[in-house]
Image (cartoon, rainbow, N blue to C red):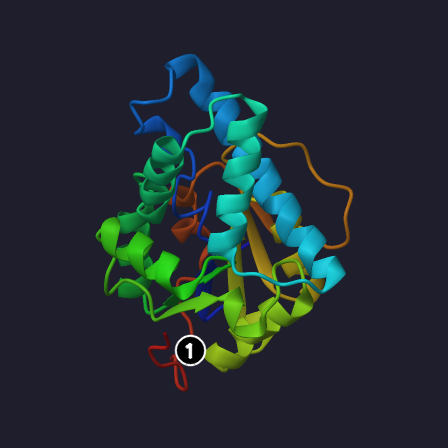
């Protein structure tokens, strides 16, 4: 097995990788079951499009505002917009469900001596609520938001921010994302990358190439080196 030798920290994307962004609509009883999948897909697609387009335009607003704008677009498109429904969905988005394997994977990595962190477009408040709501407090050495650099992934400044906060070179970081575009960008930046292809996406034709492709994070610990150097210089960062 081609293990990720030299890795000292495992950094995770949040939404779609650690947290299930579909869980907001799935837990909302006001949405008919036959509309939940299409709403989730449209909401997510527009959310990502707005991050990329605003980064290109240099017109930054934080991820919470973008999430609301994307939801408004989706609700209008499906002709189900209402203030009550919008409020309910936004509140549910604050505390998305973690994927079932996440807690055990984090515990295993930390017990093996790896630092763990989140690097996400989400705001600090969003990430704090998500981590707490999923009962993952204490399982991350760092919870890092792109808001600190007023840009969104895939801008290189976001990945550099993670390295600066962790005090590590890119080659010592394994970055995990379920988003193929994110995985390719982190690889092109120089990180080691594991693409968690939860959604059976096709491979992207983009710069960079993930080191490994897995179906769930449960496969990650087996890719980590069995022995490694100490984590000198890494401390808890918020």
Q: Nearest the camera: 116 or 220? A: 116
Residue that sits furthest to the top in the current view: 34
Task: Give me the residue at 67% from left, 32% from top.
Answer: 202
Q: Nearest the camera: 175 or 222? A: 175
Residue 121 location in percent, x, y? 52, 58
Q: Nearest the camera: 183 or 40? A: 40
Displayed quadrant of residue 232: bottom left
Task: Give me the residue at 69% from left, 37% from top.
Answer: 203
Q: Is residue 203 above or below residue 211?
A: above
| Residue 236 visible in the picture | yes
Residue 213 location in percent, x, y? 57, 43
Callout 1 environment at 10 Å: few (<14), some (14 to 19), or many (20+)?
few
Query: Which residue in the protein does label 1 denote?
Result: 229
Secondary structure under tag 1 reads: loop
Task: Give me the residue at 36% from left, 62% from top.
Answer: 125
Residue 86 location in percent, x, y? 40, 36
Residue that sits furthest to the front in the current view: 83
Q: Is residue 79 left or right of residue 82?
A: right
Displayed quadrant of residue 28: top left
Image quarter hosting the C terminus: bottom left
The total of numbered circles placed on residues is: 1
Residue 65 location in percent, x, y? 50, 53
Q: Is residue 182 above or below residue 26?
A: below
Displayed quadrant of residue 82: top left
| Residue 4 visible in the picture | no
Q: Nearest the camera: 57 or 20? A: 57
Q: Is residue 92 above or below residue 128?
A: above
Task: Give me the residue at 34% from left, 71% from top.
Answer: 141
């Amino acid at each position: 097995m081609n293990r990720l030798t030299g890795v000292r920290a495992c950094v995770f994307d949040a939404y779609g990788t650690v947290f299930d962004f579909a869980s907001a609509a799935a837990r909302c009883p006001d949405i008919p079951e036959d509309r939940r999948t299409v709403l989730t897909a449209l909401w997510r697609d527009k959310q990502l499009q707005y991050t990329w387009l605003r980064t290109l335009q240099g017109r930054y607003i934080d991820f919470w505002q973008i999430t609301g704008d994307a939801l408004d677009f989706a609700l209008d498109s499906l002709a189900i917009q209402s203030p009550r429904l919008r409020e309910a969905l936004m509140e549910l988005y604050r505390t998305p469900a973690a994927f079932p394997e996440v807690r055990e994977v984090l515990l295993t990595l930390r017990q093996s001596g790896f630092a763990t962190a989140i690097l996400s477009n989400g705001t600090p408040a969003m990430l704090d609520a998500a981590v707490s709501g999923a009962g993952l407090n204490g399982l991350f050495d760092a919870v890092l938001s792109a808001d600190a650099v007023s840009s969104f992934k895939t801008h290189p400044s976001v990945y550099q921010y993670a390295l600066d906060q962790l005090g590590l070179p890119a080659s010592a970081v394994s970055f995990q994302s379920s988003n193929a575009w994110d995985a390719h960008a982190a690889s092109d930046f120089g990180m080691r990358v594991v693409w968690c292809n939860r959604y059976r996406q096709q491979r992207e034709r983009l710069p960079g190439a993930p080191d490994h492709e897995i179906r769930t994070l449960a496969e990650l610990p087996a890719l980590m080196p069995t022995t490694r150097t100490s984590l000198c210089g890494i401390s808890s960062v918020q």
